[in-house]
Image (tube, rainbow, N blue to C red):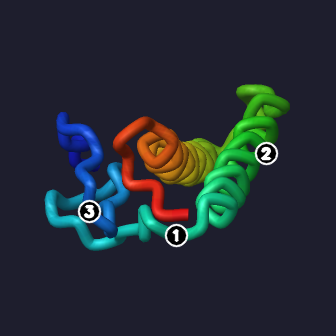
Amino acid sequence: MADPPDRPIQNNRFHPLSARPVPAAVLCFDSLADLMDLAETASHRLNAARRLLETTATLTLPDADHKALHAVSEAAFLLLSDGIDLFNALAFRGLPGGADTD
């Protein structure tokens, strides 16, 4: 996966998700969406990642299918990354001078 850019979120509407397999920003989210919608979407992704990680935490090593474990780990990483991107947009909108339009 490509490393996320080392720049803060700019004051524009659509932001690329930081976890991506290519340098091009293919998937983006609307940073000016309703604050509650952003928060609920972020929370949903973070909770889904937590459930995936809880599943892996209960496995014993002899029980683990390494291909399945890799797939679950990658999915958890993507969900965590998306959730953090969304919460960062929420934090930016809440800062003085941020892009809060509500």
**Pick the front one: 75 or 27:** 27
Q: Nearer the viewer, residue 73 or 6?
A: 6
Q: Residue 60 at what x, y percent from top left?
A: 79, 27
Q: Secondary structure at mark 2?
A: helix
Q: Residues within 10 Å of mark 2 (few under 14, many from 20)?
A: few
Which one is nearer the viewer's eye here, 36 or 100? 100
Q: Identify the residue shown where x is 36% and y is 57%.
A: 17
Circle nearer the N terminus (1, 2): 1
Q: How many marks?
A: 3
Look at mark 2 in the image and give the residue it sits on. Answer: 51
Question: Distance from label 1 to label 2 (Cα)?
Answer: 26 Å
Query: In which quadrant of the rendered view does residue 92 lie?
Result: top left
Q: Is residue 30 visible?
A: yes
Distance CA(mark 1)–CA(mark 3) = 12 Å
| Amino acid type shown at disc 1 | Ala
Residue 35 vertical position relative to residue 3 in the rendered view, above or below: below
Q: Residue furthest right?
A: 58
Name the residue that disc number 1 marks: 33
Which residue carries the number 3 mark? 12
The amino acid pointed to by label 2 is Arg
- Residue shown at 41% from the left, 37% from the top: 96
Q: Is residue 52 left or right of residue 35?
A: right
Give the side of residue 72 with respect to residue 48, left or right.
left
- For the residues carrying marks 2 and 3, which lies nearer the camera in this image? 3
* Sequence-wise first label, 2 or 3: 3
Q: Nearer the viewer, mark 1 or mark 2?
A: 1
Which of the 4 image quarters holds residue 38? bottom right
Q: Secondary structure at mark 3?
A: loop
Q: Can residue 77 be seen in the rendering of this structure?
A: no
80 lies above or below 102: above
